[in-house]
Image (tube, grey):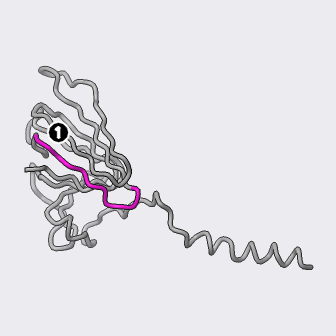
Amino acid sequence: MMRSLTVTLLLVFLPTACSTVPTADASPAVPQQGASCPAEFDGALTRLADRTLLACHDGKWAVDTEVYPSSERWVSYGPALTVYGQGRRNPEVLAGNWVGTPQGEDARCSAEQAVVASAGVIGPPSTVTAEPNSPLKLTLPTPLFTVGLSGFCLWERDA
């Protein structure tokens, strides 16, 4: 009798107990139009998987309708956020020193750069990754074609 009672209690209470334990690698919420965004993201842009561009203004994410968006502040939240540099027309990021600041527990910022090697030729990608909870400092060169920003991070150009 005691053995069956123990098994029953474990089956009833174990799923509930496990579902309330937070995980360190929990993904951040995907930004959505009309959803709130933290004050430190004000003025930053992000891009959704469907290529919709969102801007954080006054604590809310809103669709950004700029034809050629460019910003000195970007938010990556999971999948790589690919933005275009000055190695192609209408850059979304400018060359210079940038810092990726982790925004969540155990967040790790990473950047994969592809630079124009010569006319019509893109060089091999170069990736840099910070330790968890550490800022990532990097320099984006003038002939940057793309940079893939990943991790739950706020990316800012250092003026």
**Residue 17 falls within the magenta-colored stretch:** no
The percent coordinates of residue 103 (x first, y second) are 31, 60
Q: Which residues are magenta?
A: 96-106
**Residue 99 falls within the magenta-colored stretch:** yes
Identify the residue at image location x=82%, y=75%: 6
Judge left or right: residue 12 versus residue 97: right
The majority secondary structure of the magenta stretch comes to: strand
Identify the residue at image location x=12%, y=21%: 119
In the image, 116 versus 52, the foreground residue is 116
Q: For residue 154, which quarter of the picture?
A: bottom left
The percent coordinates of residue 159 (x first, y second) are 7, 50
In this view, 123 is above or below 98: above
The percent coordinates of residue 51 (x first, y second) are 25, 51
The percent coordinates of residue 100 (x first, y second) are 24, 51
Judge left or right: residue 58 versus residue 152: left
In this view, 101 is above or below 9: above
Identity, as a three-letter code, of the amino acid under mark 1: Thr
In the image, 15 versus 138, the foreground residue is 138
User: Can you identify the residue that label 1 sits on?
Assistant: 139
Identify the residue at image location x=88%, y=74%: 3
Identify the residue at image location x=16%, y=66%: 42
| Number of numbered discs on residues | 1
